[in-house]
Amino acid sequence: MESHAVLIAEITDLKARLAQSEAVSEGRLKVLNEKAEELRKEWKRAEAAEAEGYSTDACSYWRTLGGLAILEKKKSEIRNDMRLPLPDMVVAAAHCQTAGLWCESLARFLKVPEFVIDIPMTYDESEYWTNVEYVKSQVLNLISALEALTGKKLDYDKLKEKMALIKKAATLRRECMELCKAIPTPMSFFDCIISMGPIHTLRGTTASVDFYQALKNEIEERVANKVGVVAGEKYRLYWDNLPIWFKVGSLSTKLAEMHAVPIVGAYTHGGAYWEVDRIDPEKPLESIAEELLLICKDMNAKYRVERIAQMVREYSLDGLIMHSARTCRPLNIGQYDIINAIREREGIPGIVIEADPTDPNYYSESEIDRLLPAFVETMESSKQHRK
């Protein structure tokens, strides 16, 4: 298994061997020194959470967030671009089982107030509007708590303006994603996840609208000129669960070399205000409540089968890659059943790869190199059978 500790050891060993070579430049040794130091600091982040008693099987997002908060609180050395300002209050929407626990743990460690919004699963449409009102009532309670903490009243007119900008950006982003129905696809799933940044960190700003408008213009040009993201595209894929963030570049290259490209996924084509018709700038609290509820849909395996089957047809997909995340188990539920259901309904195969969104200790390069070529052979056989 590849871990930060192993990487640091390998770099240290390589530096020692290179130092004995007359051919090695001082510049190369400097780069290696900087890389080793960077890895030490990143590794320290997760180690900080583990030192406080958090299991390595706990959510790696939490161990990253909690580790950074612990290091900041203890005034430990960390990279400047990873510094986490300590909050006056911790807020979470518990759309997964651990999000509320993040909030409680962090608030307890920092000794600050906390507020957790409970997000129920909607199993039947008859429950939907009752659940919307339930979540909305909690958002109203959060507003009251923040007003008490800050001594300021919420400006509802400004919130409506922000929601209108969110709708514009979300609409443009969805249009970008839907342009990927073109063959060859002008953008990959990996591009989609990276381009999610503005809908999260610049939400409700003109900057996010401008970004997605520029992105849409570029993608439309690529579609018009039939410019694909992968040369000689042959296999179009669905990606399930969270990305493996630290291997996005590597996996993109590996798949491209086999003429395969992930195009859609639950992470990109479900959340981040995907259902733009539900956004009503005149009813911002209801819109927020609906968005929080809709995120939970992907934890319903029955819903995922229907949604994935729809994407298989709309995006002309050839296979499913199901990322079974070691420390994010709720989204793993039903993955094998989903593969079987989609194979029966749509005639395409799927594969499960075990890894983690942010913890390299649960990623095996050799296992990926074994699984992906075999899966491509399976997809080719399936394609020939479907002709």
Image (cartoon, grey):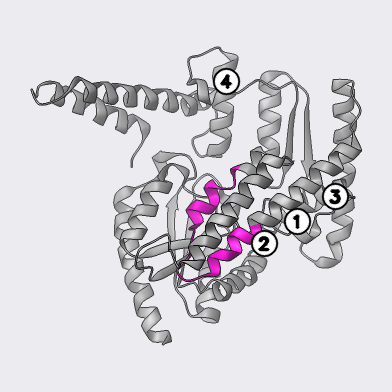
Q: Is 114 placed left or right of 97 in the picture? A: right
Between the C-alphas of marks 4 and 1, the distance is 32 Å
* Disc assigned to residue 70: 4
| Quadrant into which the N terminus falls | top left
Identify residue for label 2: 300
Identify residue for label 1: 121
Q: Earlier in the sequence, mark 4 or mark 1?
A: 4
Between the C-alphas of marks 4 and 3, the distance is 38 Å
| Quadrant into which the C terminus falls | bottom left
Q: Is 161 placed left or right of 292 in the picture? A: right
Between the C-alphas of marks 2 and 1, the distance is 8 Å
Q: Residue at x 55, y 62 (%)?
A: 220
Q: Earlier in the sequence, mark 2 or mark 3?
A: 3
Q: Earlier in the sequence, mark 2 or mark 4?
A: 4
* Residue 151 coordinates in the image, percent (x, y): 89, 20
Q: Earlier in the sequence, mark 1 or mark 3?
A: 1
The stretch drawn in magenta includes residue 191: yes
Identify residue for label 3: 281
**Residue sitting at the far bottom:** 387
Q: Amino acid at mark 3?
A: Pro
Q: Earlier in the sequence, mark 2 or mark 1?
A: 1
Q: Residue at x 34, y 61 (%)?
A: 372
Residue extent of the magenta highlight:
174-197
Mark 1 closeness class: few <14, some 14–19, many ≥20 residues within 10 Å? some
* Disc assigned to residue 232: none
